[in-house]
Amino acid sequence: MVEKRKYNDLKHGEFFLPEELDNIDFPDIPPHIKLLNPQVMWEKGITGEGVKVAIIDSGCDINNPLLKGKISHICNLTRDDDGDRANVTDYSGHGTHVASIIASDNYNDLVVGIAPNVKLMIYKVIEKDGQARYENIARAIYAAIQSGADILNISLGGSQEAPQIHEAIKSAIKMNVCVVVAAGNGGNGESDLSGLWFPSCYPESIQVGSIGSNKKASKFTTTNHFTDCVAVGEKVLGLSQEGGFEVLNGTSQAAPIVSASLALLKEWAKKEFKRDPSESELYSLLIKNTKTIKGVSRNAQGKGYVVFNKNTL
């Protein structure tokens, strides 16, 4: 009998075919989701129903069976595939991984997605070579707003100022759309050392940093005083563009955990108060459901890690 590998022994970039997951000792709820305590919402029947999340990224494997029926809109803004607007082929797997963290169905008894009933809007802005033009990111934001997105997930960025993206984000906020952005992976383990990553450090963005499931700041997470909150961005299991599963580290993985959390909070608030919450109200609900980590700099954690609490809902 082959001894199963431990979840904590998994490495960044490891790929598994579905049948290979049986050789890994996965808990039903992986650590990156368990820390969020989404059962508080699931037990209320809150799964993201009626909420649209736009993923501005590298595309998505829209034919993956665990994402079936969840994708309501696609748009390719890159030059890939001759600029075919209806082709959002994900050549890196990054966008597929992000999408699955938010909305994938379970694989057997293994929880993969946090808000499985959201509708996903896929905007491909990252080219096959891994680059993304700022003007295309801005175009995607405007397009998502016009198409009725409630939440934008932007797990990308750069070290150069992005005024056109900033203006687009401001427009999103005016339309009561939350904009969640990964803090970036430019850290060096020194949480008091500030770094700036755009567009996450714009004050209108919800900047998300990364921690491990041990509640320690990830060495790679970019830190600065614009950090709003954190989520687990280490050893995160998600779908791969090759029909399998992949384990990845990064603030790119922490951000969709927060986007999914906002989707759950939005559905809850609509049912609780019989109306749509504003962007500022939804942000306040998010921060209300955070917990400070003792001994971690505010630059590295902001208000703390997102965790649902029965006493705050």
Image: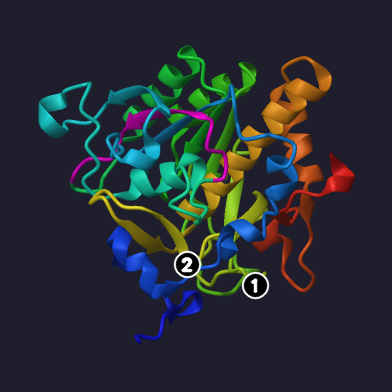
Instruction: Determine the residue positioned at 78% across, 37% down.
Output: 285
**Residue 216 numbered tag:** 1
The C terminus lies in quadrant: top right
Q: Residue 9, located in which quarter of the rendered image?
A: bottom left
Query: Which amino acid is tagged 1?
Result: Lys
* 83 sits left or right of 9 in the view: left
Instruction: Determine the residue positioned at 20% across, 28% down.
Output: 87
Residue closest to the eye, 114 or 215: 114
Residue positioned most to the left: 82
* 285 sits left or right of 224 in the view: right
- Residue 262 x, y percent position in the rendering: 65, 36
Instruction: Determine the residue positioned at 68% across, 34% down.
Output: 46
Does the stretch in magenta take in 133? Answer: no
Which marked residue is nearer to the observer: mark 1 or mark 2? 2
The magenta region covers 114-128
Q: Is residue 91 visible?
A: yes
Does the stretch in magenta take in 121? Answer: yes
- Residue 268 x, y percent position in the rendering: 74, 30
Instruction: Determine the residue positioned at 44% across, 59% down.
Output: 237
Which residue is under mark 2? Answer: 235
Q: Which of marks 1 and 2 is nearer the N terminus?
A: 1
